[in-house]
Amino acid sequence: MFEPLLEADPSFREKWERFQNEYRSEDELPLYLALSDFARHLIENLETGNTLRFDGIFDVVERWHVDGDPYVQEAATIGLLEDLQNTNLHREKTCPEDFLPWLRPATRVWWARVHEFWGSDTKPIGAL
């Protein structure tokens, strides 16, 4: 799941390797936690305007939603999109809607479902 993401965004590799080392004694890596770390990484990149890799990153996220098994699909939605929408993770410079231009069709559907589930005060997906 993570190798295509690391190809799209090599700047996350160091954090990914630290994550793997931290959880190396686990039977299975808690990928939801890694995706939460990745969401924070994306928000930091958004804050600094470092969005050059976002097209490739969100191509990978789209593949997770379209071609992933149920675990991967759910992790992409709950582990990543939910955190990208978490206004508590955004500072003054960014907001969840700032990610909308990079979302692909299936990812937009899941973004909207997360938004509707939480009754978020962010703009509905149709308000692009």
Image: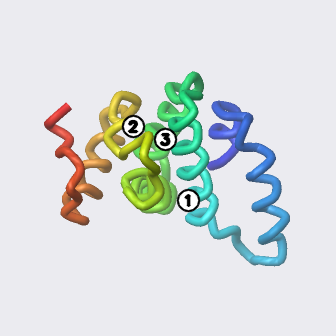
Q: Residue at x 14, y 37 (%)?
A: 126
Residue type at mark 3?
A: Val
Image: 104 above or below 91: above
Tally of marks: 3
Residue type at mark 2?
A: Phe
Discs 3/2, front: 2
The answer to whether residue 101 shows anywhere in this view is yes
Where is residue 123? Give x, y as percent.
19, 45
- Badge 3: residue crowd in 10 Å (few <14, some 14–19, many ≥20): many
Where is residue 109? Give x, y as percent.
26, 44
Looking at the rendered structure, which numbered label has been put on residue 61?
3
Who comes first in sequence, dot 3 or dot 2? 3
| Contact? badges 3 and 2 (CB < 8 Å) | no
The answer to whether residue 70 shows anywhere in this view is no
Discs 3/1, front: 1
| Contact? badges 1 and 2 (CB < 8 Å) | no
Could you give the CA–CA distance between mark 3 and mark 2, rounded to whole angstroms?
12 Å
Who comes first in sequence, dot 3 or dot 1? 1
Callout 1: SS: helix
Looking at the rendered structure, which numbered label has been put on residue 99?
2
| Contact? badges 3 and 1 (CB < 8 Å) | no
Looking at the rendered structure, which numbered label has been put on residue 36?
1
Q: Residue at x 73, y 37 (%)?
A: 11
Q: Nearer the viewer, residue 28 or 87?
A: 87
Looking at the rendered structure, which numbered label has been put on residue 106?
none
Who comes first in sequence, dot 1 or dot 2? 1
